[in-house]
Image (spheres, rainbow, N blue to C red):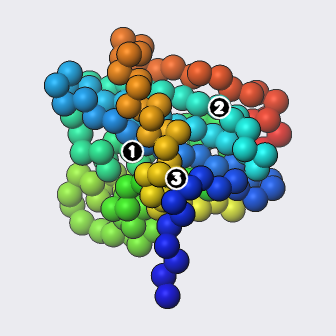
């Protein structure tokens, strides 16, 4: 029996970080935003990053790579990545193949994900990803800034 995805956010176990990622596409402005929230086992925000781009990609394509790239850049391990895009999660976990742009992107993600020890990617409902979702939607007001790190707790990142 397949387990239902959670409908509300849950804390990661001690020693883990949870990274929630969501994208908002603003078709009229030809822009999109990606929000990445990192929280710890005490439900504290470790860091939040907003990224803004030109274009109107498929949300599944915009969402999947940025959180992995940032976690890799920060040198994080013991991560629970959560996305509300089931096709992206399935594509990473099931090793889908093919020549489409999306499958090429998934192959890049799987390669990057292999650098993380003791980590996982899972699908969650939007209601469990509401902080990242609302932040990505509201970020249109920051659209002139290409990348914005709202805050980052350096001491925690260095410990992990």
Quadrant of the snapshot with the C terminus: top right
Q: Residue 159, labelled with which disc?
A: none
Which residue is at 49% across, 39% downward?
A: 132
Q: Residue at x 65, y 23 (%)?
A: 151
Q: CA distance from mark 2 to mark 1?
A: 17 Å
Residue 116, quarter of the rendered image: bottom right
Earlier in the chain: of badge 2 and badge 1, it is 2
Residue sitting farthest toward the top: 144
Query: Which numbered marker is on residue 128?
Result: 3
Name the foreground residue: 87 vs 158: 87
Residue 77 rendering spot, x and y as whole percentages: 70, 50
- Which is in the foreground here, disc 3 or disc 2? 3
Q: Is residue 25 something one can see in this rendering?
A: yes
Q: Is residue 68 above or below residue 1?
A: above
At a point 83% along the width and 40% down the height, the residue shown is 159
Which residue in the structure is indicated by mark 2?
47
Q: Is residue 32 left or right of residue 90?
A: left
Quickly name the residue at label 1.
63
Tell which residue pokes out farthest to the left in this image.
28
Does dot 2 land on a helix, a strand or a loop? strand
Badge 3 marks a residue whose secondary structure is helix
C-alpha span from label 3 to label 2: 18 Å
| Local crowd size for mark 2, using a 10 Å CA cut-off: few (<14), some (14–19), many (≥20) | some
Left or right: residue 70 compared with residue 108:
right
Confirm or deny contact between disc 3 and disc 2 (CB under 8 A).
no
Label 1 or label 3, whichever lies nearer to me, is 3
How far apart, in angstroms, are the residues tagged by discs 1 and 3?
16 Å
Callout 1 touching callout 3 (CB < 8 Å): no
Question: In the image, is residue 83 above or below residue 139?
Answer: below
Among the 4 quarters of the image, the one containing residue 58: top left
Outermost residue toward the bottom in this view: 1
Closer to the chain start, of discs 3 and 2, is 2
């Amino acid at each position: 029996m397949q387990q239902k995805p959670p409908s509300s956010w849950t804390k990661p176990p001690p020693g883990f970080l949870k990274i929630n990622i969501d994208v908002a596409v603003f078709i009229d402005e030809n822009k999109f935003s990606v929000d990445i929230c990192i929280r710890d086992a005490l439900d504290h925000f470790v860091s939040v990053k907003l990224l803004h781009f030109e274009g109107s990609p498929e949300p599944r394509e915009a969402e999947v790579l940025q959180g992995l790239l940032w976690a890799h850049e920060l040198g994080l391990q013991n991560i629970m990545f959560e996305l509300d895009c089931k096709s992206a999660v399935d594509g990473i976990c099931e090793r889908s193949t093919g020549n489409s742009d999306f499958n090429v992107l998934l192959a890049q993600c799987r390669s990057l994900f292999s650098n993380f020890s003791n980590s996982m990617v899972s699908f969650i409902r939007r209601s469990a990803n509401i902080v990242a979702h609302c932040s990505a939607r509201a970020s249109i007001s920051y659209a002139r800034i290409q990348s914005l790190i709202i805050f980052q707790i350096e001491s925690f990142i260095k410990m992990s």
